[in-house]
Image (cartoon, rainbow, N blue to C red):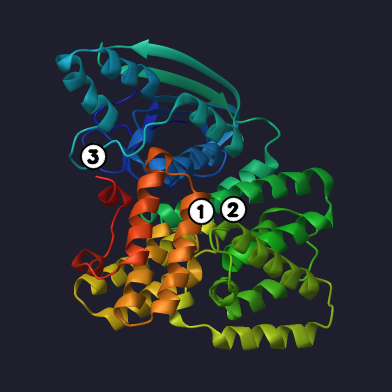
Amino acid sequence: MKVNVGCGTTYKEGHLNVDAFDDTVADKLMSATNLKLDDNSADEIYASQLIEHLGITGSIYALSECFRVLKPQEKLIIETPDLQKSCEIYANGDREDRKQILPWIYGVDIPGMVHRFCYPEDLLEETLQKIGFTNICKEYMCYDPYEPIVKVVCEKPAENAPYHCMATFRKHLLQTNMVDLDNQLTALEQERLLELFIEIVVDFFQTDDPKSIEELITKGGVQHPAMTKLLIEHLQKVTDKKIVGDHHVLTFLIDIDFPCCLMHSVSQTPGFVGKQQNLFSAIYKLGVKSIENLLQHNDTQNRMSALREMSKQTTADDNIPFFSPKIIMLHARRFYSVGIKEFVLRNYEKSQTLLEQALSYYRDDLLMYWNYARILRMRGEEEQAQGQYQHTFYLIDTFDHGTQNDAIKQALTTEMQDGTSDIYKRPITSVRNLTR
């Protein structure tokens, strides 16, 4: 069986033509990220003008589905916009060239036709390799002067067990709603963990080393214990290899919402102004050490009791879907955004509480400290305000703002010395406003 995935209105004879939206010529309607086809059942898969419509995480899951469905040593054929050539046409062309090439880059605004992510060819090749494809070849075509195409042909290798295992696991993640492809930010963070999982699983299949499973539990348990437990269960189902290790640790971590506990630890750890990565690393290592101790049965009952107590101290504010630097930053900025809104509305006490919460999670944002200093000053807490101004100064020096540095420092110095102007009673939304 040959499959034409995302066929649209292009019918290919001798293929099963499938599309998610358009049933004009499709033999079956199905999503490219959830092909209703058996493992190792396709002799060839053709995917023309498909992956650019799916977003970066959606395209990864679609390519993984292609890997799952292909028979060993059979080929996936991809055609997608040549992003580099398209950008060259835009950059070097006249107004008419730019007008003609833009729909090829962005697609058109009708269902199923928007281009959500056009792959640079090197990133596409890297993605295919991580999924498990080999013998990747590229060629360049241009049926229309404003539609340059890169064609990629790749193969599912004969020896593919760990990669096929991870392809079936991806499908399981979607079926259990563990991954939401519409939530691109969280899905991308989960993807980074999946890349680590792939490395560990490949090593485990090659060596049978039980330390690989311990590494899986330890590192995965810190960031997303539920996803990690699902992978352990999946490995037990799809392989006859012996999966050793105390998997019940993951159940315990899920029960106490361990990422939430770690987030609470971030918020309760003082200092680290301008050193957010160091803060994350410290708490991450603490999480890893906690799991290692549980796996090694070092005073297990007392350690579990301590972690349960930590869990009781968490609040709804600490809830995050995934423990990673990016998710923590986004979580903090939600508090910050609402805090700025309350500042504008002159609800200063509420604004102060929200900005304090934002800063408890994230320590690298100059404007968080600066606006917090303004709020403190307006509430008559001058000494504390000066401390936050000093933190702001430190961040100006820590994160270079180029030619704006001196102007920002001068604006801050002026404000610290004389905060009576009405302009200081409004939030700063951009350092650019200070240097105009």
- The CA span between labels 3 and 2 is 36 Å
128 relative position to 233: left or right: left
Whole-percent x, y for residue 156 in the image? 60, 31
* Mark 1 Cα-neighbour bin, 10 Å: few <14, some 14–19, many ≥20: some
Mark identifier at residue 193: 2
Q: Is mark 2 on a helix, strand or loop?
A: helix
Mark identifier at residue 143: none
User: Which residue bears the numbered disc 1?
Assistant: 189
Is mark 2 in CB contact (under 8 Å) with mark 1? Answer: yes
Q: What residue type is labelled 3?
A: Asp
Residue name at image x 80 percent, y 64 percent: 244
Q: What residue type is labelled 2?
A: Leu
Whole-percent x, y for residue 246 in the image? 77, 71
318 relative position to 98: left or right: right
Relative vertical location of residue 115 with respect to residue 31 in this rendering, above or below: above
Comes first in the chain, label 1 or label 3: 3
Whole-percent x, y for residue 70 in the image? 54, 35
385 relative position to 190: left or right: left
- The CA span between labels 2 and 1 is 7 Å
User: Which residue bears the numbered disc 3?
Assistant: 23
